[in-house]
Amino acid sequence: ENTQFVTFGCSYPGNLAAWFRLKYPQHTSGSVAGSSPVHAVLDFFQYLDVVDESLTAFTGIECDSRIRQATEQIENMLTTSSGQTQLQSDFKTCTMPNNTMDISTFMSDLMGNWMGTVQYN
């Protein structure tokens, strides 16, 4: 067929738009990939630096400091069984976050709130 598409996306969907054009050039007459990091980076922790700077700029140093302190407190709690039990109770998790994958997912979910606020507000 001669059907042609123009793909659009911003952020991660922008990656998909660009990759679609690369994979199916015969079906794509154009692609708009706004704000898209087309070079995938594993464990892109530097993104949290941007989140931190944005939170400081828009909410002030005191709010940013409180977020940092709360994050450090949670990280410390994750190192002890009593802290893990308390976090399970506080956040109503199904199980205690007590292995690398659980802890990574737990922290990612918490940080995702701040990342989403910066990214989409």
Image (tube, rainbow, N blue to C red):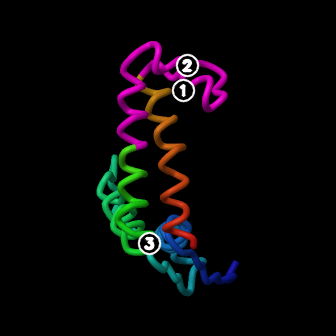
Q: Distance between the residues labelled 1 and 2?
A: 8 Å
**Snapshot quadrant of residue 109:** top right
Mark 2 lies on a secondary structure that is loop
Badge 1 is on which residue?
Answer: 87
Left or right, 62 with respect to 117, comes to left
Q: In this view, does 79 lie above or below 103?
A: above
Judging by the rendered image, the residue that carries numbered circle 2 is 96
Three-letter amino acid code of the residue under disc 2:
Met
Depth check, mark 3 against mark 1: the one in front is 1
For residue 19, above or below residue 98: below
Mark 1 or 2, nearer chain start: 1
Check disc 3 and report the residue beneath it.
Answer: 36
Instruction: Evaluate whether residue 27 shows in this view.
Output: yes
Magenta residues span 70-99
The stretch drawn in magenta includes residue 45: no
Q: Earlier in the sequence, mark 3 or mark 1?
A: 3
Whole-Å distance between the Cαs marked 2 and 3? 36 Å
